[in-house]
Amino acid sequence: MDFFDRFAIPNPSIAIYASMVAIGLTVVAIIAGLTYFKKWGYLWREWLTTVDHKRIGIMYLISALIMLFRGGVDAIMLRAQLAVPDNKLLDPQHYNEVFSTHGVIMVMFMAMPFIFAFMNYVVPLQIGARDVAFPRLNALSFWLFFFGAMLFNISFVIGGSPDAGWTSYFPLAGNDLSPHVGTNYYMMAIQISGIGSLMTGINMITTIFKMRAPGMTLMKMPMFTWSVLVTNLIIVTVFPVITVALAMGTMDRLFGTHFFATTNGGMDMLWANLFWVWGHPEVYILILPAFGLYSEIISTFSGRNLYGYKSMVASMVIISALSCMVWAHHFFTMGQGALANSFFSITTMMIAVPTGVKIFNWLFTLWKGKIRFTVPMLYSLGFIPLFVIGGVTGVMLAMSAADYQYHNTMFLVAHFHNTIIPGVVFAMLAGLTYYWPKMFGFMLNERIGKWAFWLLSIGFCLAFFPMYITGLDGQARRMYTYSEATGYGPLNMLSFVGAGVMAISFALIVYNVYYSVRYSPRNIGADPWDARSLEWATHTPVPEYNFAIEPHVASSEAFWDAKKKGHELFPGKVEKIHMPNSSGVPFIMSAIFFVFGFSMIFSLWIPAIISLIGIFACMAHRSFENDHGRYISVKEIEETETKLRGVN
Amino acid sequence: MKVKSALLMLVFTIATVLTGCEPLMVLDPKGPQAERQAHDIILSIGIMSFIVIVVFAILIYVLIKYRASKASPDYEPPHIEGNKWVELICVGIPIVIVTYFSIVSVQSNYIVEAKPQAYADKEPLIIYASSSDWKWHFSYPEENIETVNYLYIPTDRPIEFKLYSYGPITSFWIPQLGGQKYAMSDMTTTLHLAADEPGEMMGRNANFSGKGFAENMFNVTAMSQKDFDKWVKDVKKTAKPLTKEEFNKLLKPGHLGQMTFTGTHLGFNPPPEHHQMGAPGEKEGHSDDSHMEMNMDMSDHQDHN
């Protein structure tokens, strides 16, 4: 093969060439803009090298929104292709690539950074800390994620995208049946960002265990922090599994090993097992922080404490334990026999119990409350009924004998979108609206936000409920087309219309940001929602050091107590504050990881070896570096405090 | 029980009406296994609808009753930690439901994984169903015939499918006869089905298997044992024999119409039965030349029919 052939797209189309041009122009525009406005130094000093958890959180947020757009465009293409029978909009290969990247991007590069955004931004504020436990590791986590995501996205224009589904089952994902480099991209990009996720897990657990404000015992932590703790325990438990599985898959594809091959002692279902041992807990990694956000929001806008705090915590811990015992329900139809299926069927259904407890606790939090219908609250209230539908269809799927009929059909697709969109995406949009004033110092417009919420909810129902029906009528998932005789046409057209309504809703959210940047008032104070936990006790914008004086806590709603019961939140006086220094090494190291990943994907061994040495050099540099951080003087703190108090 | 079955019928009718006139394939069973599965599905839809309605009702009630616009401006919501009894009920009811479902689920597992009870006294017909990109091969070892992309089966008799694949993992699925099961290239799985009445049905591969996946379907015709025997006799008279060369040609990636042969490929290209799930580890070397056929150049992938 000619050296440059490997970079060509195996399946070119006008759309891809147009995207290449668009990507090229965007890059040129960004570089030109940065140069013209002389922002290179600002970008490097304030963002690329920052170790501030708030800025890292905002960068996660921006990345997640961009990826939401990318994954959403994929989704629209899929629905457009299926809107009418025998459609020729996409050919099968193109369709396969689009649904594969849609899944990977939405799970790995949209939902994950979205939850990391809130973890990073909110948790240290909520526990009264100045930063996370390992700020520089945190920056490394972000940049590894970022470069992993970029690596995955360039597959679209260089070499071709993965085409074996987001689950990438072998032997379909092996070299014989997927000969182009797409699946290499899958292996390397998820690997690189996965290492970042694992580091975040360690970082967040340490932060929550070691850096809580005085008085904040574990059972006095706000519910979001609890959800983040449980989530990160799952991350640390299961991410090593996907790391190993991806490494084995990479070796199968690049070095001719036979872990997942069907010959020479390999086993194709081994991949499926390893993938889902990580993959199923992964969905709880996404949903638990969402539960945490809903708990905060529902409590705030009901004007009440969260009902059943202890059972909320217990149910999350139970969910996290069960989540690691259900993976085989993803292949009830593998032929593992009635006994194994019965076991996994029962463990799967058991998850419904703690989840039900949470739903009832939210309902009882509304009970006797004073409910304000703000945009974050609307998302949370929309979540409850829609998620219940997703949850009960989950119990239906858990009945393994019946699952033989649901498996691989649109019924399943409807189910998991029904949990992930009202569960995770609604939570992220609720969290975005809720924390926006804390992050940026102004509120998003409520009226536009409400329009977006209603359109999204209606669009969601239109798009996904028909799939339950077509699934029961025998429409398999991942088919690029179907014949008119099947009769799936009208319902799929309805789904397409629903997807269009959802797209309009996302466009409205983008417009809302633009509108609010221009017109929203800026003097909103530190606590615009009349909220209850510590993150609202500090100024807006949040100073670099978060709290001038360390807060002292006596309940899970310390800030509410301070407002209503005269609890003294900040006893003591201002002292000098120790803060970490910025560093360019995480960015540089991650960029080298990008080069390494790219070289591996295309089997360019010499650059791969050189970049690997570069990665170890960065680690060695860190080991021998003498960086003890810096102090912010009392005078500087007092100046900042006076200025911020003046703002509010 | 009367009430329950009436309720089930009601849900069934609603589901049917909602989707137009034709009943949904999965809920229109033509065999005992599919019937059991449809029963489980309808049962769970019924009970789950009840839960959904309860949650909706509570939610709507609290939202109307406790909205801020209705409350007096000086109303301060109380601080309530939780109530042992309320929480016990919230745990108890789901546990009861899940327990009930678990019992049903376990029973059904053993039913669908065994020879259909209704025809327990009859000798099963064994059919080897193997997939290759993107077609299905059906071998009838007792009758010594083989078909491609279509399946004739006798009614009122258990059918035991032996499933395997000459390529990616596929899933053998005839919705109206029963749920699907995977076909893999390194082991053989077993699926028990049976048909109650004569008729034509859709069968397909349900598991994504690459470019030709969407068209990876086959026709199923159920007929009386007498008609089936007659068909077998006709095939033996008219069809040409399946040779190894011919079969290797069939395995090439692409789409084929319906084909009929005498003889089966089981002799010269045996299924990976020695690697049954749960069987002790097997030495390498079950990959014969048929597997190598899968590695051929991808140019053949293009011939859609």
Image (cartoon, coloured by chain):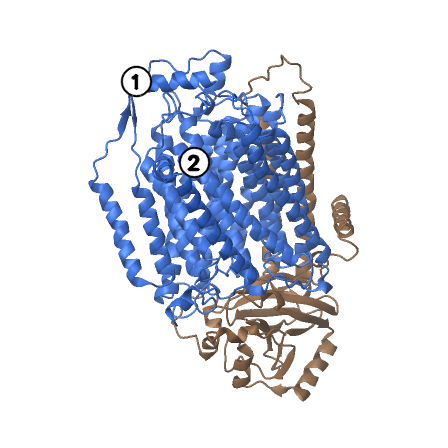
Q: Say how many tags the image has.
A: 2
Quadrant hosting residue A586 = top left
Q: Report the residue at 79% width, 56% height from top.
A: B21
A6 vs A422: above or below? below
Letter of the chain in brown: B
**Where residue A417 sits in the image (x, y, percent)?**
59, 47
Q: Which residue is mark 1?
A: A634
Give the residue type at disc 1: Val
Q: Which residue is mark 2?
A: A57
Asked if disc 2 and disc 1 are in contact, CB closer than 8 Å, the reply is no
Quadrant hosting residue B238 = bottom right
Quadrant hosting residue A602 = bottom left
Location of the N terminus of chain A by quadrant is bottom left
Q: Which mark is residue A210?
A: none
Of all chains, the one bearing label 1 is A
Letter of the chain in blue: A
